[in-house]
Amino acid sequence: MNFKIKKKLNNELGRVGVLNTPHGEIKTPAFVTVGTKATIKAVTPEQVKNIEAQVVLANTYHLYLQPNDEIIKEAGGLHKFMNWNGPMMTDSGGFQVFSLGTAFGDSVTKIASKTDEKLLSNPTTKSCCLVKIDDDGVDFRSCIDGSKHRFTPEKSINIQHNIGADIIFAFDECTSPQANYEYQKEAMERTHRWAERSLAEHKKLGVSESTGKQQSLFGIVQGGRFEDLRKKSAEVISKMDFDGFGIGGSFDKEDMGKAVAWVNEVLPEEKPRHLLGIGEPEDIFEGVQNGIDLFDCVAPTRMGRNGTLHTQNGKINILNAKFQNDFSKIDEGCECYTCQNYTKAYLSHLFRAKEMLAGTLASIHNLYFIVDLVEKIRQSILDDNFFEFKKEFLKAYYRK
Amino acid sequence: MNFKIKKKLNNELGRVGVLNTPHGEIKTPAFVTVGTKATIKAVTPEQVKNIEAQVVLANTYHLYLQPNDEIIKEAGGLHKFMNWNGPMMTDSGGFQVFSLGTAFGDSVTKIASKTDEKLLSNPTTKSCCLVKIDDDGVDFRSCIDGSKHRFTPEKSINIQHNIGADIIFAFDECTSPQANYEYQKEAMERTHRWAERSLAEHKKLGVSESTGKQQSLFGIVQGGRFEDLRKKSAEVISKMDFDGFGIGGSFDKEDMGKAVAWVNEVLPEEKPRHLLGIGEPEDIFEGVQNGIDLFDCVAPTRMGRNGTLHTQNGKINILNAKFQNDFSKIDEGCECYTCQNYTKAYLSHLFRAKEMLAGTLASIHNLYFIVDLVEKIRQSILDDNFFEFKKEFLKAYYRK
């Protein structure tokens, strides 16, 4: 993997770059489309390409449980299995192990708790995903069938080698933004030890057996909302031989820009940085301005399937009665497949009739909107008008 | 509309033709893809085009209830509304009015019963689609919200003019194959009177106001399993000024070939004939051999969404455990998008994970299989080897 910075944002951490992977280049900053279970929900890989999405992120936790990484290995790796031959990433499964099944419900939803042994062993508790952390790894239950499993850093890296994505992540502990300082510190230190072990396992394994290609490993910076922990984590992780970095999203929404800046001031400039699980337009502007190169988020497709659609003037809910006979495009000026060919009235009909094409057309539109937004942000840096573009966009989108 | 017969099947009723519509030609025999609610379930119009499907049939009953034909008219007609600019048909809504909500459960499911007034007026009965027939029309309840509606031949034709498909159907009464001779006769005679009224309304209305195009009206032959009724119905309907004919499918599976032959021996050779709601491979061979030009059926997409897939060696259920690590194509030799790009193992994963792409890929495959089969049947007539092809195909598919 090779990362080149093409241009920097004046007096800021932001930059424009190009990241080369065994399956092609990624122009950064870039929005990474999420294909959790080896499919971008409701759309074909060709539709994803037509959106000009550059890269897909799949999920280690989900693919391990279903269909299992051994099957993906047998298929010749994830690219071949799911028919996506562009760049691909897998996260480490850390976030899912800690978050799934536990209601948390804030804009950044990452949680870890030392769950009571009794709860975990009681099959009548709604405990499908309850977790138990020790220094070696994590016991958890499958969110599919409640069966017991264990992830360690070594296990996560082995699974990710079987899956064979171009960029993989170290196994980390995801904490709740509400966790106190002491717990955040303890979890962060564990994440650092797990980072070392992830790196060692990755080196030991060499190229992916599934694809025969070299994978890049990104380390993950944690530390919650605390400046000293974030900086400490960035320092420790940046000293390890990672190819790039992920920033774990355990902070409140308002802190995000600040926390990203704390971290990116410490991380080596020449390596790429991925802000995990963030996809709201204003957060993307904040992230880019503060030195983020890659973003991923399920929001565009998830929102889309629920009928919430991005427009340059903010989000709309297509199920609103007024759209039933609105024969205009979702977003005037949008050049996505959906806006080129369909009206709000048609989308409204598909959603009301619960037709599968509703999710497809809405996902295509929302993905296009965000991928295109990040591409426009990139271009605005190249054209020296990032701040004008940011102001204009946010004013129209949030009316502020 | 203009229909030309290119070649006839020796000593049989079967033929190869070309049917011209305001939105392009249909090479017959042809399989008509079903887009009940203004969308072919789970696939985009472009995916339908890539399957080389020539024509789409939408449903008057469903579109009247949702989004309503006035909205489709306002959109400029169905072609524009749903982004399909090839030939298009709507059925009359007759079948749905009589069948929806009433469990019938045989291979050809068409039912009519003189439902008790009390049942229809009792809101606590599961009576959403119970119907009440009189000579003027039919009272029925919406299968969406239970609201009361009335269709008459005039109403059906008006809706179909608002929708604006190239080929529309007269409003008919669909009877159960189990109905006795007396009832079949009574219903058939009513269908004949309704055919006259449908035709008169169609002529009165002129071109579709939604599209500005001339629509073709097909009359429907009924008569159940009874030879004299089928022949009588064909005689009566063929004397009316219809552009083509539909054959209502109220017969048992074993009778189908025979009943189709009774009718097509009477119908004028120079006009096209559509066998309504039939899509099983052996029935298609029987139909073509006995003079059918057009078939439509929801089976390919419905079966597909449930994981049942056509192969040249019969149907398979992709949820069968053995396919989880089967890295071969669904059907060797199949050139559909799905078979070109995905394995059984991947389909198996998508179905198990309940991913929306499962339905999309399975529908593409099954539609391609049937559209391609009918195209191969057409070619076999042109090549003078229909009977060899039929024998070979049925032997492999049904192992008989």
Image: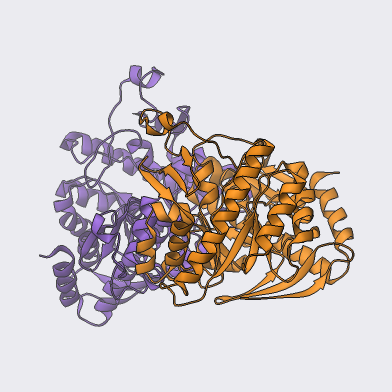
Chain colours: A orange, B purple
Q: In front here: B100 or A80?
A: A80
- The part of the image, by quadrant, that contains residue B332 is bottom left
- Name the quadrant of the C terminus of chain B: bottom left
Apparent side of residue B200 relative to residue A89 in the rendered image (left or right): left
Against A243, residue B304 (above or below) is: above
How many labels, in total? 0
Can you give x and y, in whole percent of width and height, for residue A376 in the image?
Answer: 77, 64
- The part of the image, by quadrant, that contains residue A287 is bottom right
The residue shown at (57%, 58%) is A195
Can you give x and y, in whole percent of width and height, for residue A126 in the image?
Answer: 43, 31
The residue shown at (55%, 36%) is A113
Against B371, residue B153 (above or below) is: above
Against B196, residue A218 (above or below) is: below
Apparent side of residue B257 relative to residue B279 in the rendered image (left or right): left
Can you give x and y, in whole percent of width and height, for residue B382 in the image?
Answer: 27, 80
Q: In front here: B31 or A47?
A: A47
Q: In front here: B140 or A153?
A: A153
Instruction: Mark yes or no: residue A28 visible.
Output: yes
The residue shown at (21%, 57%) is B260
Can you give x and y, in whole percent of width and height, for residue B143 in the image?
Answer: 42, 33
The residue shown at (64%, 36%) is A179
Instruction: Mark yes or no: residue B84 visible.
Output: no
**View extreme (bottom): residue:** B383
